[in-house]
Each structure stands twice: as structure tokens, then as C-alpha cells.
Amino acid sequence: MTIYEASERYQIPIELLREYESWGLCGAVKKVMGDWQYDDQDLERLSMIMTLHDIGFSNEEVETYMRLLIAGEDTKDKRLHMLNKKRDSALDEIHFREKQLERMDYLRYQIRQSKKETIGKE
């Protein structure tokens, strides 16, 4: 499957496919008549790359994670550490957003109370 076929069939941006190729992680990808050919293992790896991007990994983090993944079972602890770190960061962001919402709700409450007081005086 060519880069364009893979992009269209699996909704993977061409830029992501080119990035994947540039990392040299394409085990079985071969150039045939000037086009890269992707096999099932490459498509599984690309799916993992997209997942990592979706959960907030930077390009550098994705590349590190993928190199660890390809290196094998001995890297499970390092990959788990990366995922735990990203999860902790996501939780911190959620808590920060919750505090923002609480403050916003308080301001909305104050405005509503002020409106009620104004109407009550009339």
C-alpha cells in the first residue's frame, strides 16, 4: 500500500506518514517504484502513533515511545513511565480546569444575585 493509499484508507495525515518514514522505524516498508509500501505491522505502528498524538504526546515523545516499543518487551517499564507521566499531566490540567469552572460559576452566581436584588428593589 502506498503512502497515499494508507493516508486515505486509514485517515492518517500524509505529514504523519512522512514523519514516520523519517524516523527510520519502518521495518518492512520498502520503496517500490519510488513509493513507500506499508505492510500490516507498519499500519499497526501508525495507529499507535496516532493514538499517542491524540493523547497529547509531542513528536519527540512519540518517537521515543515508538523506539522503545520496537526495542521490545524489556522497555515496558519505560513506556509505562511515559504513559503515567502523561496521565498525571492530564489530571493536573483537569484539576486546573475544574478550579477555573468553579471561579467562573461563582462570578455567574454573583451576577445572578445582583440581578435578583435589582429586580427586588423595583
Image (tube, helix red, strand yellow):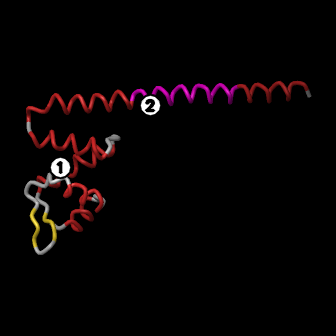
Q: Which residue is mark 1?
A: 45
Residue 11 placement (x, y as % from top left): 29, 59
Magenta span includes 101: yes
Asked if residue 121 lies left or right of residue 15, the reply is: right
Residue 1 placement (x, y as % from top left): 15, 66
Q: Residues within 10 Å of mark 1 (few under 14, many from 20)?
A: some
Tag 2: amino acid:
Glu
Residue ID at (85%, 28%): 118
Residue ID at (56%, 29%): 100
Q: Residue furthest right?
A: 122
Identify the image quadrant of residue 82.
Answer: top left
Residue ID at (8%, 32%): 74
Point out the image quarter for the C terminus.
Answer: top right
Asked if residue 2 lies left or right of residue 58, the reply is: left
Q: Residues within 10 Å of mark 2 (few under 14, many from 20)?
A: few
Query: Height in image: 67 above or below 20?
Result: above
- How far apart are the alpha carbons under marks 1 and 2? 28 Å
Secondary structure under the numbered disc 2 in the rendered image: helix
Secondary structure under the numbered disc 1 in the rendered image: helix
Residue 62 placement (x, y as % from top left): 25, 44
- Range of residues picked out in magenta: 91-109
Magenta stretch secondary structure, dominant: helix
Residue 120 placement (x, y as % from top left): 86, 25
Q: Which residue is mark 2?
A: 93
- The mark found on residue 88 in the picture is none
Query: Height in image: 100 above or below 60?
Result: above
Identify the image quadrant of residue 8.
Answer: bottom left
